[in-house]
Amino acid sequence: MKDEQIDAVSKLLKSMSHPIRLKILCLLQDQELSVGEIRDSVKTTNANVSQHLNILRSQGIIDFRKDANFIYNRITDKRILELIQKMHVLFCPDN
Amino acid sequence: MKDEQIDAVSKLLKSMSHPIRLKILCLLQDQELSVGEIRDSVKTTNANVSQHLNILRSQGIIDFRKDANFIYNRITDKRILELIQKMHVLFCPDN
DNA sequence: AAAATATTTCACAAATTAATTAATTAGCCT
DNA sequence: AGGCTAATTAATTAATTTGTGAAATATTTT
């Protein structure tokens, strides 16, 4: 890896390396979820989820669509899906 | 992933997500290197490399052996090797 | 034993990250 | 329009991370 790539990938990893954000990504693996649904799953405040979502959005990892006054989030980058699957295989062999 | 696994994996990712540490891991993919060799490659101070190595060691990602007054470092966890390879395929398709 | 080399440890300042609360925006419904 | 719900933004504070330089440790060499 070249230095630029190192920088880009480390930023990506950093944005995935917070437990709340990693959990969000896991939840979004196979479904889209609203901010409120995510908030309930990760058990924190609305504002906190919103901020974490923003970090993932600014990295281009997730995208959202608006429906009424709900915002549905989903993973846009297929490479992230692959990476999460790989981590699952490597580090969570049972289940 | 269960919550405990989420926590464990996010710690792992966090330790890999600093550019210096990611570069160290890339360098150690196929060879063992002394602290000084790593210092030259990543262009920082000895103390800084030493501290980053400690973070990787305490995560069980790398190990070292002593030879004279050199310390040679290598990756111990094969899963880390696989993960790095996957990231390389996904995010650095050319080269 | 002293000097030199390789690495680590320590203490500190600067920068970044994270959670919390309150305020704000946006869209729906009656 | 006014009230309600969903989500975001902003400001503040606490905690963590990072890099640096100096001192310490360990081993080799002279």
Image (cartoon, coloured by chain):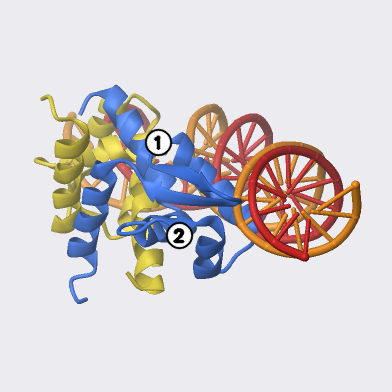
Chain colours: A yellow, B blue, C orange, D red
Quarter of the figure that contains the C terminus of chain A: top left
Residue closest to the eye, B79 or A58: B79
Which residue position holds label 2? B19
Residue at disc 2, secondary structure? helix
- Taking the image as shown, residue A59 lies to the left or right of residue A92, namely right
**Residue B81 at x, y = what percent?**
26, 50
Q: State which chain disc 2 sits on.
A: B
**Which residue is located at x 50 percent, y 62 percent?**
B38
The quadrant where residue B88 appears:
bottom left
Quarter of the figure that contains the N terminus of chain A: bottom left
Which residue position holds label 1? B60
Of badges 2 and 1, nearer the viewer stands 1
Label 1 sits on what residue type?
Gly
- Taking the image as shown, residue B57 lies to the left or right of residue A32, namely right
**Residue D19 at x, y = what percent?**
64, 59
Q: State which chain disc 1 sits on.
A: B
Q: CA distance from mark 2 to mark 1?
A: 18 Å
**Residue A30 at x, y = what percent?**
9, 41
Residue closest to the eye, B57 or B3: B57
The quadrant where residue A29 appears:
top left
Label 2 sits on what residue type?
Pro
**Label 1, residues with CA under 10 Å away: few <14, some 14-19, many ≥20:** few
